[in-house]
Amino acid sequence: MPGVIPVVSPPPSVVPVALRAKPLTAWQPGGADGASQPMPTEGPLVDRYGRVHTDLRVSVTDRCNLRCVYCMPEEGVAFRPRAEILSFEEIARVARVARRLGVISLRLTGGEPLVRKGIVELVRHVAAVGFDDVALTTNGTALAPLAQSLAQAGLQRVNISCDSLRPDRFAQIRRRGKLRAVLEAMDAAEAAGLAPLKVNVVVMAGVNDDEVIDFCTFARDHDRVVRFIEYMPLDAEGHWNRDQVVAGDELLARIAARWPLVACDPAGSDPAPAERYRFADGRGEIGVVASVTRPFCGTCNRLRLTADGAIRNCLFSDAELSVRTVLRSQGTDDELAVVLRRAVWGKLPGHGINDPGFLRPVRSMSMIGG
Ligand code: SAM
């Protein structure tokens, strides 16, 4: 059947970063070599490789009510002092500047965004900016009672993380919180119109990879998009190792052996991190975020604002520029815009996880915002 994915062999252990650099657009001054070009001062947020940035991830807190094994340590987490965390007004101001620079989608994340007091108010602030898409990533444990108010405040979609459908295993992976609350949150989100609902599953070899077929059944039965995410070297405890990564190709091969799959975007033109597949029988959809084995840096259009006011151009780069300094020294919107432009302009062609000299970033996932 055309478009049905073939069974693919596992990727080599060192996978080069895929760079599909787009040609530089006409408005950029200078020659053909991006590295020698001056940074543009107008037009969209573009980097040296022609990637236009239209997606802003905003971490609203580095705190979380869970302690997932792949993300945070169980005890002894050092959170940023409150005074360093951006206020709602500060976040909304950065969002407005980003919108002016062509950002069209905004995602609130964390830490756990729903533990930030007044989150509904923040959603109202950022939704008023006028993005095409306002979404939120949550562990779901506190979502059910808030779903309706979040939707009324302007939230359009949620991604809910859920790494196991078995209560005991859920407890082992997430170390706090209850599976039942997360499943109820999914129902509540859909009832509030926060759809389509995406369910994020971090797949770890020997931990939960035997649930891939169960998660597909779940996706098919509930019409929820389950996204399998490769385990990335962003856990706070530094336990990540390559053997625990289940390659996206391997997952797809396992799933396709049970239900044939059809790629939703075979040309790979969608900048979203997940490669999307429909089940060929028309029931349901899944996604694979193969950040480790099949990096999608060549089409990356994302930049990030950390809870303490740093702009990051990549999850894996320690290069940061502070908007907090500008915000708190009576800086202008134009000065904020320059920070965003500089951050994007400095972006490297790829995240480098598979380079021999790769060093994991100093900040772990919860301190950046996933
Ligand atoms: N607390 C929210 C949640 O649980 O969804 C939002 C923040 S969390 C950092 C965002 C996403 O990052 C979640 O889907 C989580 O599963 C994922 N994540 C965290 N650490 C990861 C890691 N080491 N590798 C891959 N994904 C990870």
Image: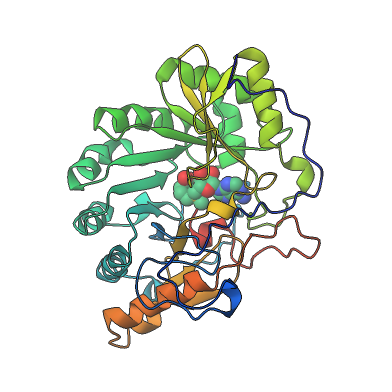
Image quadrant assignment for residue 93: bottom left
Q: How many marks?
A: 0
Where residue 281 appears, as percent x and y from the top left, is: 50, 11
**Res 65 visible:** no
Name the residue: 20% across, 54% down.
Answer: 124
Q: Nearer the viewer, residue 365 or 68?
A: 365
Query: Is residue 108 visible in the rendered structure shown here?
Result: yes
Answer above or below: position of 344 versus 232: below
Q: Is 54 above or below relative to 220?
A: below
Compared with 91, 216 (above or below) is: above
> Which quadrant of the figure has residue 8?
top right
Q: Quadrant of residue 348?
A: bottom right
Side of 95 where 23 appears, left or right: right
Name the spot of residue 332 as percent of width and height, x first: 27, 83
**Which is nearer the eye, 220 or 80?**
220
Q: Nearer the viewer, residue 111 or 243?
A: 243
Q: In this rendering, would 237 be left or right of 186?
A: right
Residue 225: x %, y % from top left: 45, 29
Quadrant where the N terminus is found in the figure: top right
Q: Which residue is drawn at the image coordinates 72% and 35% (left, top)?
A: 205
Q: Residue at x 43, y 38 (%)?
A: 160
Image coords of residue 306 (percent x, y): 45, 65
What coloring was used for the rendering? rainbow
**Vertical order, 257 against 51 (above or below):** above
Question: As drawn, which residue projects farthest toward the bottom?
Answer: 329
